[in-house]
Amino acid sequence: MKDKVVVITGASSGIGEALAVEAAKQGAMVVMGARNVEKLQVLAEQIRTKGGQVTFVEMDVTQEEDCKRLIESAVTAFGRIDVLINNAGISMRALFEELDLSVLKKLMDTNFWGTVYCTKYAFPYILQSKGSIVGVSSIAGFKGLPGRTGYSASKFAMHGFLESLRTENLKKGIHVMIACPGFTASNIRNTALVADGTQQGETPRDEDKMMSASAVAIHILKAIDKRKRTLVLTLQGKTTVLASKIIPGIAEKLVFNHMSKEPNSPF
């Protein structure tokens, strides 16, 4: 990542925060975007204290103009963009039959449209640098997960968008990667939306047994360097993706049984 300009959405916590810290550590010029400007300020100061180059923008990926402003700020600060990491995302946990449809729309606006908006405005600069566009997705983008209809739908949509973009620009030298970390220790389950649109508040899983956000960030940056098409992390994640392709019926039963064991499972 040395001397590359890396733009990261959802950079105030979790995988996004870890990506910003690691990219700066590797010598990148980092541009962070998120809604929580206080956290961005603290993170930027930490990075600068260690000699890193960083700037940040308070923004919401569901707002097209905010995404445009993030990209413009990156170019103003550093003159170009080499890597765009679409990391901002939210999750959910509720049965579809009980779900307020505004929740599903919010998931699509954040996870799918946020990726589309940022990619649209960054695209001319990525073409110039023959750089990388990355979508931080999920195993839920390969296999529909029960209780996560909106989340899986948004990630499937992200996959389709990025795969089409890759093929459309096959001869233009750009790199498009879909990164699927699997269950990662972060706050995404705490902020996941329930049926009425409020936040879940507490994670139903043992976060200590998951891959750390820092480990995920290192894997993602390494995969960008190698210009991989797809990155699937954890044995469980790789097994789920493979099983969904070769034994889809059995995979559905296994996924159902696994997810139903969560504390206070909705099904």
Image (spheres, rainbow, N blue to C red):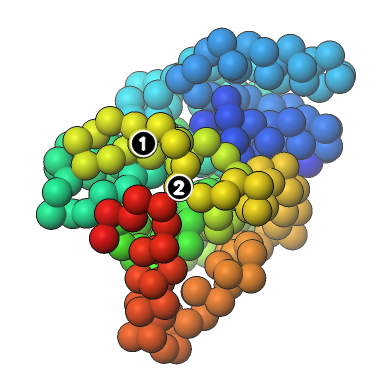
Is there a contact, CB below 8 Å, between mark 1 and mark 2?
Answer: yes
Residue matched to label 2 = 204
Q: Residue at x 68, y 36 (%)?
A: 18
Q: Quadrant of the N terminus?
A: top right
Q: Residue at x 84, y 14 (%)?
A: 49
Identified by mark 2, the residue type is: Pro
Place of residue 224 in the rendered image (x, y in percent of width and height, measured from the top left)? 69, 53
Q: Quadrant of residue 233?
A: bottom right
181 sits left or right of 255 in the view: right
206 sits left or right of 29 in the view: left
Residue count near mark 2 (Cα–Cα under 10 Å), binned few <14, some 14–19, many ≥20: some
What is the distance, in whole Å, between disc 1 and disc 2 at their CAs?
Answer: 9 Å
In this orientation, does residue 119 appear?
no
65 sits left or right of 239 in the view: left
Identified by mark 1, the residue type is: Gln
Outermost residue toward the bottom in this view: 246
Q: Quadrant of the C terminus?
A: bottom left
State the residue in front, 54 or 180.
180
105 sits left or right of 186 in the view: left
Q: Quadrant of residue 114?
A: top left
Place of residue 162 in the rendered image (x, y in percent of width and height, measured from the top left)? 44, 56
Outermost residue toward the front in this view: 263
Q: Secondary structure at mark 1?
A: loop
Q: Residue at x 48, y 82 (%)?
A: 243
Q: Quadrant of residue 189?
A: top left
Place of residue 222 in the rendered image (x, y in percent of width and height, measured from the top left)? 75, 53
State the residue in front, 167 or 15.
15
Residue count near mark 1 (Cα–Cα under 10 Å), binned few <14, some 14–19, many ≥20: some
Q: Residue at x 83, y 32 (%)?
A: 25
Residue matched to label 1 = 200
State the residue in front, 82 or 1.
1
